[in-house]
Amino acid sequence: MIPKLFQLGPIPVYSYGLMLGICFIVASWLLQREFKRKKLDEGAAVNITFIALVGGVIGSKLLYVIEEWKSFSSMSASQIFSTEGLFSPAGLTFYGGLILATALIYIYTRVKKVPFLRVCDAAAPSLAIGYGIARVGCHLSGDGDYGLPVSEFMSWVPWGTDYSKGTLPPSVAFRGSDIAAKFGGVVPDNTLCHPTPMYEFIIGGLIFWLLWKKRSVFLGDGKLFGLYLMLSGASRLLVEFIRLNPRYMFGLSEAQLISVVLIGLGVFLYYRKPTTFMEKAKVTGKPQKKTKSQS
């Protein structure tokens, strides 16, 4: 693992930060291409990318604080606003960022009178590949997002990964867990674990490929985004089973519960009927007669 790549004078360059930067550059470029293809305002694509960046970071930190409230409540003000707290390179929870960024983009599209669901469709491929790239950063930094020791599940896999040099090595990541008890109280740092961030990178690439192929076929506003929600939600739901995260309800982690909600929303968007005159015409490929309510 390489949490810190190199130093530029007094400025350290961290692997997670670098991959996050690459993620937003790639996502922004793809989004602008889609906006141009869909004949949407390309300037809005830049603004939406910026909103997604700011809202994503703030939202991911807010959810992290909620998850770790017990730890934050015991910190002093100086600790909270330090690298031990809010400015820690770890502690970016994807779903928190997705939820806040989506809410802010919805407000922006309403103000600018840009079709929200069409924007979501344009962003779907970018979200898929962007998430995958960011997960490479998680892998390189070894920030605790990795999976269970391979000895606990699928011990035959040859790609178990040593995260001993990560920001959260196994002795810390599994502290106080049932897994630690099996290792006599402390999981050795050189324990080989499932590289779940790389699993998600591969899955994210496959989801991107599928969405990119389907993007030119008009399915109806919101349907491509619905497909993204279903596929990405199912991916996270399954990967979480080989991660050590607290279980809250029905034996599922917080991320899995959010995944179930997003899958349900995705099903609704994908299978909903076209509602507007223009949408019906595009989906069927036939001219539609306007009713009085559509005039």
Image (cartoon, helix red, strand yellow):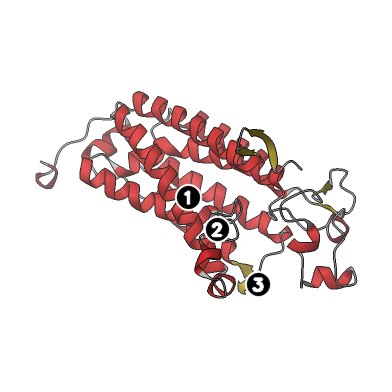
Q: Residue at x 83, y 69 (%)?
A: 180
Q: Give the mark toward the camera: 1 or 2.
A: 2
Q: Which mark is residue 73?
A: none
Give the mark nearer the N terminus: 2 vs 3.
Answer: 2
CA neighbours of label 3 inside 10 A, class few (<14), some (14 to 19), many (20+)? few
Depicted 10 relative to depicted 237: above or below: above
Find residue 118 and report its horizontal and vertical position in percent.
34, 39
CA neighbours of label 2 inside 10 A, class few (<14), some (14 to 19), many (20+)? few
CA neighbours of label 1 inside 10 A, class few (<14), some (14 to 19), many (20+)? many
Task: Give the left or right position of residue 112, taking residue 295 as reference.
Answer: right
Residue 183 lies in what quarter of the image?
bottom right
* Closer-to-camera residue (282/250): 250
Secondary structure under the numbered disc 2 in the rendered image: loop
Q: Which residue is mark 3?
A: 251
**Which image quadrant: the C terminus?**
top left
Q: Residue at x 54, y 54 (%)?
A: 87
Secondary structure under the numbered disc 3 in the rendered image: loop
Residue type, label 2: Ser
Q: Which mark is residue 57?
A: 1
**How much space separates mark 1 and mark 2, taking CA atoms?**
16 Å
Q: Which mark is residue 82?
A: 2
